[in-house]
Image (cartoon, rainbow, N blue to C red):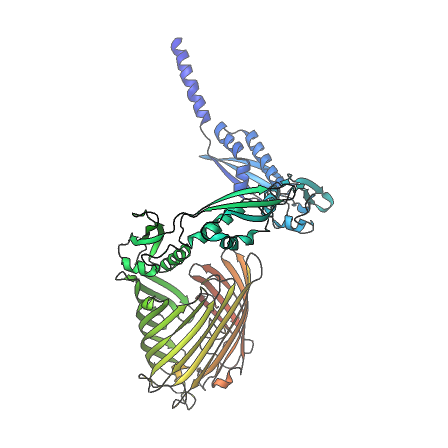
Amino acid sequence: MILALLSMVAWLPAQNAAAQEPVPLEIQFVGRETLSEGALRKAAELELDAFRRKGQQPSALDDAAFLMEEAYRAEGFPDVEVDWQLEQAPPQYLARFLIQEGKPLLLGALTFPGATALTPEQLAGLIGVSPEGTSKSPFRRSQLQGLPSAIQEAYWQLGYLETKVSAPEYLEQRAEQRRGARLVIEEGTGYVLRNISFLDAGPLGEEACQEVASSLVGLPYFPRRQVELAQRLRFLYARAAYPETKVHLVESRDRKTGDVLLAVTIEPGAATTYSEIVVEGVERTNPDFVRQRLGMEVGEAYDREKLDDAFVRLFRTGLFRTIKMDLGPGAQGPEERPLIVTVEESLAKELSFRSGYGSYEGIRIGTSFVERNLFGTGRRFRSSLDASQVGWAAEIGWTDPWLLGSEISLDLPVYIRRRQEPSFTREELGFGWNLQREFTPRWNLSGGWSFRRSNVSAVTVLTSSEVIAEDVNISSFFTQPEYDSRNDLFNPTAGSLARVRFEWAGDHFLGGEAAFLRSRVDLSRLISLTREQDRVLGFAWSAGLAWPLGSTERLPLQERFFNGGEDSVRSFREGELGPLDINIEPLGGESFHTASVELRQKVKNNLWASAFVDAGNVGLRADDIFGDLRWGVGTGLRYLLPVGALRLDMAWNPDRRRGEPSYQVFLTVGMSF
């Protein structure tokens, strides 16, 4: 008997443990459109967990469905119904929640009794809605619950430090199927910084301190104004060799008038000069190169602004992952201290591979090798090899980004390339030197000289007095100013690009055999039509002119302008817009221009659609630049990638002539402009 009882006692805990073992449960939602699966799971998290732990209890699923309904009602779905079905699908159960969302409530009128400093439009705009209650904005309780804290923050920025905002009181507008809200606001006193006085302005004097502080007077006051004032004064002293200045502030606040007074005392510390410049963390880079880029000398006075500029110069070399500049302890006291520059070097060598596709070039592949820190001096060596189905190119080059310690970069390229054009094949072997100076992040100017041997072969166009095909040496100078304010290099949605290039080539000059003057201008502008930047209107215009000079009567075929293709007038094949010979082969010309208007609309995630109109021409002579304008009308898709958009365009030719296709389809990587 005793043994039987002991056996039962041992069996009961085992059965209880088995009952408590979690039940595997899969959850599906049918009919869900508005709320996310994550939001519904979170709303019923405890009930679903109880079903898993306590066995197949229908009451747990009933409670879960009810809480999901409550989550929907909070988001403006008063007629929502959530039912459930339970199926056993070994080795687990399947709970399927059937959702009928019903019609959602729209957001009704929002009122803000007590608000005077901010308008209802400004207050409702904090959550991106209108206060009138006449829009199609859905009612979302979660959105309105965050409005009181947003209102308090907005009032705080205006100096209302004691503002109170009630929780939303929801108001039904059943006839219109709307739900509005009323939020009562107690603004309190609006504080303004009325005066800044200096009990002790330090060695720089009160006049210099007031100059940097006075623009804060008259502004709404909140505690961060003290931080802002202290930062300005510390920076003022840091520019004047005082790196450890302390600023003490005493606030006087009048609750009745809202006036705030700040009394300032400055402890400047010691004026400091650099006893030495120590470079730490370098392995490949020559420390003298780092000191040169800093632009500071031993014995020079500490200057925070110059240190910031030096940091930018070092960082823009691309040689360092991290840069830290600190003052070390001075052996002779705080007046002479070492500047310690600690860096972490980036990888200097890079081997890369790339691929792409263009409707004319076909598959493109390439590889590059770059050494960014040649001999530890920050100079660069590069080599590249690219190939496509219509040609190939190889190049090596050496770059000095800081010619003779200046902000001018020098590049020395040597290249060889071959490319099959629609009516001939071009081969070039060349070298030269290029100078570039960046004046601002948007403005730069480049120029240089190049020599190239330009050969032409496989000519299918009929040559004449208008068109000559010959091998020629070209020695030319060029200059190119450029402005670029686009917000993204590969997939821009706003900004402008303006580039103008002038080239002069001379015969009998440094080996040249052809003389001409050639110019080209490229302009583009992108305008975001919505705040979310999901609808963009783009404009582009390019034009070129070339004039033969001296004994050169006509530009060689390979130096002429051609038009048409995936990046110009898209209703024509590559290079086939413009004058043709009797065999319908493109002749090129001494002038061209192209204009495009394109509307881009985001469809979903990285997928965009577009509609565009292109127009352009090619003139045999320079004075034919605006003659015989041809058109292209089309639409396309773009899928944005980190290295540029994968672009599919289809364009129609509304004025098709003999031998011309009625439409063109292009698949390539990169925006047209």
Q: Is residue 89 visible?
A: no
Compare residues 292 and 257 and report the one nearer the observer.
257
User: Of all residues shown, which one is farthest toward the right?
Assistant: 175
| Mark count | 0
Q: Residue 63: percent from the left, percent from the top?
A: 58, 32
Q: Residue 425: percent from the left, percent from the top?
A: 36, 79
Instruction: Residue at 52% x, 32% y: name it.
Output: 46
Instruction: Residue at 54% x, 44% y: name it.
Output: 223
Tell me: residue 122, above or below residue 467: above
Q: Is residue 439 visible?
A: yes
Q: Residue 160: percent from the left, percent from the top?
A: 61, 44
Residue 642 lies in quadrant: bottom left
Compare residues 71 and 118 and report the one nearer the observer.
118
Tell me: residue 534, above or below residue 118: below
**228 left or right of 115?**
left
Q: Residue 548: percent from the left, percent from the top?
A: 42, 87
**Rendered-image quadrant of the N terminus:** top left
User: Of all residues shown, which one is farthest toward the top?
Assistant: 1
Compare residues 92 and 471 and report the one nearer the observer.
471
Compare residues 330 and 19 and report the one nearer the observer.
330
**258 left or right of 606?**
right
